[in-house]
Structure formats: structure tokens, C-alpha cells
Amino acid sequence: MWQLEFELPRAAATAFQDALAEIFETMLIFESEDKSAWVVKLIFEQEPEAHIYEQIKILAGEFDQPAPEIKTIELPQIDWLAENRKDFPAMTIAPFYIHGSHLPASNDGQLIPIQVDASLAFGTGEHATTRGCLEMIAKIGQPDAGASILDLGCGTAILAIAMAKLWDRPIWASDIDEDSVVMAAQNCLDNHVEAQVHTLHSDGFNHPDLKGASPYALIVANILAAPLCELAPQMKSNIAVAGRLILSGLLVEQKDLVQRTYEENGFRFLEDNIIGEWATLLFEAT
């Protein structure tokens, strides 16, 4: 077993992760000890060949970042994915208690447990965008009973699981990445909400089941600023009048662009949740 380890600037981490996940099979990402950067670990069965390093350098250039300094480490034959999961401590994002499978659920009966392990799919509660969405979900209150709810670009499905447990109702969860959908379905099983959360593979709203479930009373999308802007017209055509929209995955410096785009597409901006350099936005369809 071999490991490549390098750091990414915090502002580039989400986009880098999405791009890296399309190239490398096993990847872990977490905050550096001083929280100034994100540490990426790529795990390989065989010693990485020269073209792997070149791919990383090329990818960095595509995101206007300098080539990272890469540490190459030969690993003993153990389950490194399981070992690295231990680096993710449990966290409370009220009313949710998020923990990996290596940790027990909280004894606090007032908290809602969510079990999510570190994986290729994005969303363990560690990132500020996930936290921002969870805090916003807890704050807005339950949408009208009987109306559809969608977690678009669900990653691990942590947000869909949170809404299913918080409101005890069906939730749609979709992602453009097939591996993420597989992981999302497994997480729903692990959290005993597989009957409530409908996971599926879809590019935006293209899946017929997503179109059939619209209009939605609430859509949550923790993606990236560029695809969020591209999806604005589809969001409007698939949301109910006065439906709520939670958007994240964007830097504070991208907030004005996303806000303006959605206001131009028939949404009224309500409030934001700023955590460090990341923003979560709440809108209402007019």
C-alpha cells in the first residue's frame, strides 16, 4: 500500500476534491492541525507511477494553484480507510449529533444521531458548507406536510438523512456521481431511513422521478457556485410558490453572484449563514 499526501488551500479544497474524486479511487480529505489548509491523502495498492504526480500538477494548474508538495509514503498492509476514519471526531451541530461508525451515538436523547463515515462522497459535517446547511435546516422549520423535499447533489446524503430524521417524512436525494449515490444509499441504510430517503443518480433534474416529484417545498443544494448558477432556471421551474431554497458550496466572495443570479430567476433572498470563508444562502420562490 502507498499513500500520497499533500495540502490544498482552503478556498480550493471543494473544487479540488470533486475533480480528484473523478480520477482517484480512494481519497481522504480533512483539515490540517492549524486549520489553515486541507490535507488530501490518496491511497494506492501499488507504488504510484510518474503520471499520477503529473495528473495532480496538471489539475492544480487548471484551478490556478501552484503544484502541491507531495509526500510519498509506503504503508503497512492494514485497512487505511478505516484507520483514517478515526481522524474524524464526533460533532454536535444542534440538534444533530454526527459520528463515524467507529464511535457510539450520543447518550443525549435530545440530539438526533447521524452516522456518516469519511468516504469519497462529500459531506461528513466537517466542512463549513455542510455545517451551514444543517444549521439552516434546523432553523427554517418543517415545510408544508405532504410536499416534496430534495437534497440535490447529495454526496453522502447527510443532509437528506438529517431532514428525514428531523421531520420524519420522505426525502429525495440525488447526485451526478454514481459512487456518491451508492454511498448515500448505504448511509441511509446505516441510519435506518432507507424507506424515507429515495436516492438516485441524476444530472440536475433530468431524472424522470425527480421531475415527477416536483414542485418541491424545499430544495437543498450544497454543490459549487458555478453549477448553482447554471441550475437557477431549473430550480425555479421545479420549486413550489413560496418554496424554500438552501444553497451552499460557495465562498463568501461568490455570494453576491449567486444571490443576484437567483434573484433574477424569481427568488427572494431571505438570509445567509457565514462560517469562515464559506456562505450558505436561504431563498424563497416568488
Image (cartoon, grey):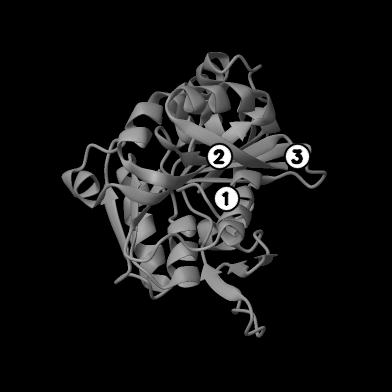
Please say if 86 is above or below 53. below
- Which secondary structure lies at badge 3? loop
Badge 1: residue crowd in 10 Å (few <14, some 14–19, many ≥20): many
Figure label count: 3
Residue flagged by tag 1: what amino acid is it? Cys
x and y percentages locating residue 48 in the rendered image: 48, 34
For the residues labelled 1 and 3, say whether their Cβ atoms are less than 8 Å apart: no
242 left or right, relative to 42: left
| N-term-proximal mark, 1 vs 3 | 1
The residue wearing badge 1 is 133
| Front-most of residues 53 and 67 | 67
Q: Which mark is residue 276?
A: 3
Residue flagged by tag 3: what amino acid is it? Gly
Q: Which mark is residue 68?
A: none
| Front-most of residues 177 and 45 | 177
Instruction: Estimate the spatial distance between the alpha carbons at disc 1 and disc 3, rounded to whole Å.
Output: 14 Å
| N-term-proximal mark, 3 vs 2 | 2
x and y percentages locating residue 126 in the rendered image: 64, 52
Please say if 5 is above or below 191. above
Badge 3: residue crowd in 10 Å (few <14, some 14–19, many ≥20): few
The residue wearing badge 2 is 248
x and y percentages locating residue 144 in the rendered image: 40, 61
x and y percentages locating residue 49 in the rendered image: 46, 28
- Which secondary structure lies at badge 2? strand
Q: Which residue appears farthest toward the right when viewing the image?
A: 34
252 left or right, relative to 41: right
For the residues labelled 1 and 2, say whether their Cβ atoms are less than 8 Å apart: yes
18 left or right, relative to 205: right
Instruction: Estimate the spatial distance between the alpha carbons at disc 3 and disc 2, rounded to whole Å.
Output: 13 Å
